[in-house]
Every structure is written in C-alpha cells, then in structure tokens.
Image (cartoon, rainbow, N blue to C red):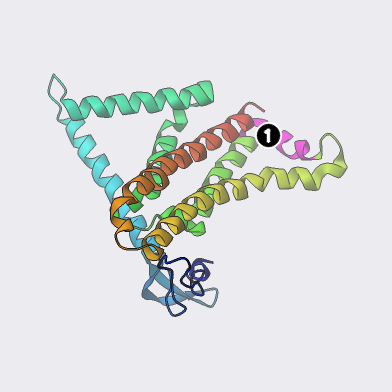
Amino acid sequence: MEYALANIGVHLTRIGGTRLLAEEEEVDFFIHKLVKMPFKFLGQDVYLTTTHVCMLIVIAAILIFALVARHKIMNSEEIPGGFQNVLELAVEALSNFVNGSMGEHGKKYVNYVGTLILYIFLCNTSGLFGLRPPTADYGTTFCLAIITVTMIQYNNIKYNKFGAITSLFEPLPVLFPSNLIGEFSSLISLSLRLFGNILAGTVMIALYYNLLPVIATIAIPSFLHAYLDFFSGAIQAYVFTMLTMVFITQKIEG
C-alpha cells in the first residue's frame, strides 16, 4: 500500500499554470527501504525502512526524557525547579485524566496510558522535525491496536469470567457471529482511524511540497504543519487513548 501511494501523482500534467508532476516524476512520501535484512519473513524480504528509523528516534527521545526527568526528581533540592514543577503538573494532569475516565480502576493504568499517549503524540508530530510519522504506517497502528484489544479481552475474562463467553450468545444464540465480530471490530477501527488520519496529513504535506511552486512552499507550510502535524496529531493521540480507556472500563464494569 505504501509504495502504491507514491505513484498517485505520476500521470498529473500541467493545468492552469500550476506546476504539477510530469509523467516521469513521483511524489515523495518519505517511504524508503534503507537496509535489507539477512533473513526473510514468510518467504518475503525484510527491510529496515524510514519508519523503523523514525520509530527508534521517537523511542530514544522518550527514554532520554524519562532518564533526565528521573535524575532531576531523584536529585531535587528542597525547593523544586521549573522543570520539576512542569513535570509534576503533567503527571497530576495525566492522573486526573485517567482517573476521570476510568474511575477507581484508573490507578493501575496511568503508566500505560501515559506512555501510550506520549508515544502516539510524538510519532504523530514527528513530521515537524522532518521525520516520517511512524503512525502513517498501518503496521505501527495495527500493533498498537493489538496491544489495546489484548488488554480489553484480558480484563473481559478477568472480571466477567465465564460471562465473557456467554455474552457472545446474548440476547439470541443466532447473534453469536455478529457479537464475535463486534468484540474484535475495535482492532480495525482503532488502527484504521489513527493510520488514516496521519497518513492523510503526510500525503497532503508531500503533495504540497511537490506540486506547488517553490515560493508557495516558503510562505504557507507553517500553517499546514501546525494543523496536520501538531493539532491533528494531538487529537488522534487523545482519541486513541480515550477509546482505549473506555473499552477497558466497559469490560471491567461488565
């Protein structure tokens, strides 16, 4: 899918004086194979791509931030500094956010939700730093959705016991197939919602830089990046984590 998207502008021609792509040109969506791995998966070649590199950069940024924050807190003076104050406010806001959504069950999910929203937000907004957002690849969002759905079903079985199975046959046994699909439909909805929105922003930015005159790419891109990368990225991170908390809470409370 990714490499097919890179060919959508191939047959565009010059219209109304606006510089469009000639047939021999392609829009660069920043999807590139970098290194071929010395092994195969299911008979297919495996490559290290720009997505993997950008993902590692995001993870490294989170780890560095966590280590710096831990060092500041562990070696803090009696009067905390500005960085520690901001950090404590962020942790308190996160705790209130999770507890407000999940109630008494939220305490043990604060760390997971905090990590999830920070990771998705940084992935979504990495385009501001010239990276290709890892969440613009369905493989990334699908794996995130798998983790969420696994937690949902784990809590379903843990708190509802055998009722997790019998509920699939309610109110009529004939509805079992549709109930079963409904249990796992969140896997598709969560992954596709995040993937589609971030990919759309990536495609629009790439088209903007490749199809318009150079002078236009100097004046306006800050507004596009502010919306497509930052605002939309923040909204999608919030939506994904909020739905995660809602689905888990529903299973816990039966």
Q: Main secondary structure of the magenta part?
A: helix
The amino acid on which the numbered mark 1 sits, given as a three-letter code, is: Lys
Residue at 79 percent of width and 48 percent of height: 177
Please indicate whether residue 34 sits to the left or right of residue 21 in the image.
left
The image shows residue 254 at horizontal and vertical percentages of 67, 28
The image shows residue 80 at horizontal and vertical percentages of 16, 23
Please indicate whether residue 224 sits to the left or right of residue 151 in the image.
left
Q: Quadrant of residue 93?
A: top left
Relative vertical location of residue 222 with respect to residue 109 in this rendering, above or below: below
Residue at 49 percent of width and 66 percent of height: 2
Q: What range of the chain is rendered magenta?
A: 158-168
Helix or strand or loop: what does disc 1 sit on? loop
In depth, the one of 74 and 158 nearer the eye is: 74
Relative vertical location of residue 87 with respect to residue 63 in this rendering, above or below: above
Mark 1 neighbour class, 10 Å CA radius: few under 14, some 14 to 19, many 20 or more: few
The image shows residue 116 at horizontal and vertical percentages of 43, 41
Magenta-span inclusion, residue 163: yes
Q: Residue furthest bottom?
A: 24
Residue at 43 percent of width and 61 percent of height: 207
- Which residue is under mark 1? 161
Tally of numbered tags: 1
Relative vertical location of residue 195 with respect to residue 227 in this rendering, above or below: below
Q: Quadrant of residue 71?
A: top left
Residue at 47 percent of width and 78 percent of height: 23
In depth, the one of 226 and 65 nearer the eye is: 226
Magenta-span inclusion, residue 58: no
The image shows residue 151 at horizontal and vertical percentages of 55, 41
Image quadrant for the N terminus? Answer: bottom right
